Image: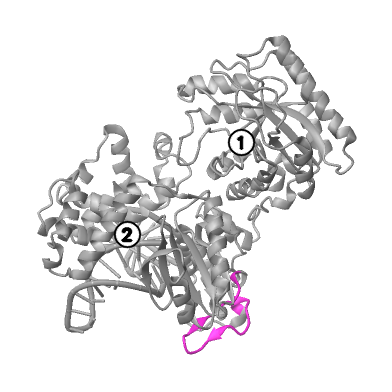
DNA sequence: GCCGTTTTCGGCCCGACTGTTTTCAGTCG
């Protein structure tokens, strides 16, 4: 709504900075880690930067009455049909308004198709300031927009990384390419990736750009210039390339890593110190001596520009410590970095690293205990061997519980007993590894909150994980009661894939999170960060919340195959994005320490 | 409209690319 008002203001010729203020408020709300409605209820709307007296009163009105009289008055002065058009790449408020007016497009529900037909009939090129090329571009953009709406999807991080490997290998074949870096949301390790951003250091930009746009899997060249280019692959994925000389690489890496909001906030901060930041370096109004920037010999006299080959030096020049890419989201990292530079604690967190991880407690083996869900594909021996390669101290095998409908209580207990014995024999005879084993289980929490197995069955496990695999549609209260009840068993230590989301397929279920956090915090239950690429569950923002509640977190892979143990890096990425430190994550603990916790 | 350890007035991130202009406007990230 704020964006629509902003567009309307633009068309009505209002002050440019008022328009920007609305855009900024919209950005900040989108980027906010707390719900706007919660803030409103606490009367703290203007705790969001960019929302002041006026906007918070408008938003209060929205929450109270469902609409804002002032917004409606503004929006009624522009044709509504422009707003759907503004979602189409290449069309902004001005072009959308010109098209709607000239072609008399009134109906906002059909405007996309109406414009498409008009383009096909050749009516756009007749409008002033539009030409043949614009018409062609708009037509193509409309078609691909409709296409993408149909199979609308962002890439999973894992998918994006595999495409990126391919194109990076291709780029490296060009001898002018000195180095190539995956940047943007990829470098920040966001769970889903919109487009792929690459930077290349080179002294011969033209040849590198020509090479890039000749990538074999390219569907079309979206744009091409002196500084870079954009191509689109067959599946609609866009790849942006920027090229620059090594002398300016530091500022390019910084700029192209983003996020957009981080960069804006950083530039605003620097500007107050008289420094103007860009991907090329830093410009200052008056000549600053090198030592004031903390850097030597980086002043380019011809361009009146300070250049930085290293990203660390770029941050240092602004007076800040280097900020890890995963937390560059304008969620407080700049303020924290400023405080750190002033010697005020706590500074930026020392984020958990992949090498800190000492084990993985959510792994499915191929031992057939006749479960209601899927078995794993690898044997315990294979899993131990894989864990050994990662230098793990321990793993936990958390197979799905035996199906209840097909077995009597006695059957279940004998299956569980057999499995325990089988695992213990393997461990006893396995001389190849010192990886220790926890015999665990992943137990369904049934809709009424009871656990799937009878009490006697838990005698044969060290501890177990609980999770929800059915009845996702319970209401908030029922679902929260259910999970808390399930977690209340003494041996239930971990809540697995806590939101139940499947990225792009299923939203998480309704849950009273503060109540669950409070329970887990008090009862010392751990919440899982599930590393499975389409789960990534908890999300980064919820990791931050859980840490604020002093909840123990554990990063598991939910592997169904020994090769999936390597997915741990995705869960670690989520944890890092949520500002998790080593000791927020319990599988950084030694075997003894985690063993004690499991037995608690 | 928002915001403030140099400001309650006077600023507001910065640059690339495209198409249509004849020096720039619109859009994007």
Residue A181 seen in the figure? no
Residue A301, magenta (yes or no): yes
Residue at image coords 68%, 13%: A454
Q: Is residue A410 above or below residue A210?
A: above
- Along the horizontal axis of the image, is A475 left or right of A383? left
What is the chain identity of the residue bearing mark 2? A
- Along the horizontal axis of the image, is B15 left or right of A332? left
Residue A29, magenta (yes or no): no
Residue at image coords 51%, 77%: A244
Q: Quadrant of residue A402?
A: top right
Residue at image coords 54%, 61%: A164
Q: Magenta region, mostly helix, strand or loop?
A: loop
Residue at image coords 31%, 53%: A145
Could you say whether the residue bearing mark 1 is in a helix, strand or loop? loop
Q: Quadrant of residue A233?
A: bottom left
Crowding around mark 1 (Cα neighbors within 10 Å: few <14, some 14 to 19, many 20+) is some
The span from disc 2 to disc 1 (Cα, nearest Å) is: 36 Å
Could you say whether the residue bearing mark 2 is in a helix, strand or loop? helix
- Along the horizontal axis of the image, is B15 left or right of A554? left
The residue beneath circle 2 is A20
- Along the horizontal axis of the image, is A583 left or right of A246? right
Q: Is residue A133 above or below residue A160?
A: below
Q: Residue A459's spot in the image, x, y percent?
A: 78, 18
| Residue closer to the observer: A129 or A533 | A533
Q: Quadrant of residue A295?
A: bottom right
Magenta residues, start to end = A292-311
The residue beneath circle 1 is A549
Q: Residue A266's spot in the image, x, y percent?
A: 49, 64
Q: Residue A77's spot in the image, x, y percent?
A: 14, 50
């Amino acid at each position: 709504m704020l964006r629509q008002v902003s567009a309307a203001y633009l068309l009505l010729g209002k002050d440019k900075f008022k328009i920007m203020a609305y855009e900024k408020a919209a950005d900040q709300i989108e980027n906010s880690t707390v719900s706007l409605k919660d803030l409103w209820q606490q009367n703290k709307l203007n705790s969001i930067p960019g929302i002041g007296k006026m906007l918070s009163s408008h938003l209060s009105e929205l929450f109270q009455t469902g609409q804002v009289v002032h917004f409606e008055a503004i929006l009624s002065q522009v044709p509504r049909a422009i707003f759907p058009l503004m979602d189409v790449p290449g069309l902004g408020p001005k072009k959308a308004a010109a098209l709607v007016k000239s072609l008399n497009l009134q109906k906002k529900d059909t405007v996309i198709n109406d414009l498409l037909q008009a383009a096909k009939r050749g009516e756009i090129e007749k409008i002033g300031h539009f030409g043949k090329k614009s018409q062609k571009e708009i037509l193509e953009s409309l078609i691909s927009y409709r296409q993408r709406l149909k199979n609308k999807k962002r890439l999973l991080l894992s998918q994006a990384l595999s495409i990126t490997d391919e194109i990076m290998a291709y780029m490296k074949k060009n001898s002018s390419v000195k180095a190539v870096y995956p940047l943007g949301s990829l470098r920040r390790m966001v769970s889903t990736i919109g487009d792929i951003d690459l930077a290349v250091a080179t002294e011969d930009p033209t040849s590198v750009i020509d090479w890039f746009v000749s990538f074999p899997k390219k569907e079309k060249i979206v744009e091409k210039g002196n500084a870079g280019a954009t191509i689109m692959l067959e599946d609609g994925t866009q790849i942006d390339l920027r090229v620059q000389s090594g002398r300016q690489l530091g500022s390019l890496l910084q700029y192209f890593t983003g996020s957009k909001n981080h960069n804006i906030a950083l530039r605003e901060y620097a500007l107050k110190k008289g420094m103007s930041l860009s991907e090329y370096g830093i410009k200052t109004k008056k000549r600053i001596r090198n030592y004031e920037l903390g850097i030597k010999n980086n002043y380019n006299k011809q361009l009146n520009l300070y250049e930085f080959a290293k990203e660390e030096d770029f941050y240092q020049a602004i007076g800040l410590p280097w900020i890890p890419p995963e937390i560059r989201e304008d969620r407080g990292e700049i303020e924290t970095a400023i405080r750190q530079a002033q010697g005020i604690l706590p500074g930026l967190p020392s984020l958990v690293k992949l090498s800190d991880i000492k084990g993985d407690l959510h792994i499915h083996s191929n031992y057939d205990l006749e479960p209601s869900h899927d078995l794993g594909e690898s044997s315990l021996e294979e899993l131990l061997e894989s864990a050994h390669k990662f230098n793990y101290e321990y793993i936990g095998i958390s197979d799905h519980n035996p199906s209840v409908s097909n077995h009597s209580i006695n059957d279940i207990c004998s299956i569980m007993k057999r499995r325990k014995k089988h695992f213990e024999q393997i461990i006893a005879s396995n001389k190849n590894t010192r990886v220790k084993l926890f015999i665990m289980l992943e137990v369904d929490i049934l809709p009424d909150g009871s656990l799937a197995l009878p009490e006697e069955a838990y005698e044969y496990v060290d501890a177990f994980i609980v999770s929800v695999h059915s009845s996702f549609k319970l209401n908030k209260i029922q679902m929260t009661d259910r999970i808390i009840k399930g977690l209340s068993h003494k041996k239930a230590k971990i809540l697995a894939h806590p939101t139940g989301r499947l990225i792009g397929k299923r939203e998480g279920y309704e849950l009273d999170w503060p109540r669950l956090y409070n329970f887990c915090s008090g009862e010392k239950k751990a919440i899982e960060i599930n590393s499975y690429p389409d789960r990534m569950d908890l999300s980064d923002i919820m990791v931050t919340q859980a840490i604020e509640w002093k909840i123990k977190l554990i990063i598991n892979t939910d592997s169904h195959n020994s090769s999936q143990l390597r997915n741990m890096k995705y869960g670690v990425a989520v944890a890092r994005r949520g500002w998790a430190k080593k000791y927020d994550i319990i599988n950084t603990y030694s075997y003894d320490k985690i063993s004690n916790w499991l037995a608690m």
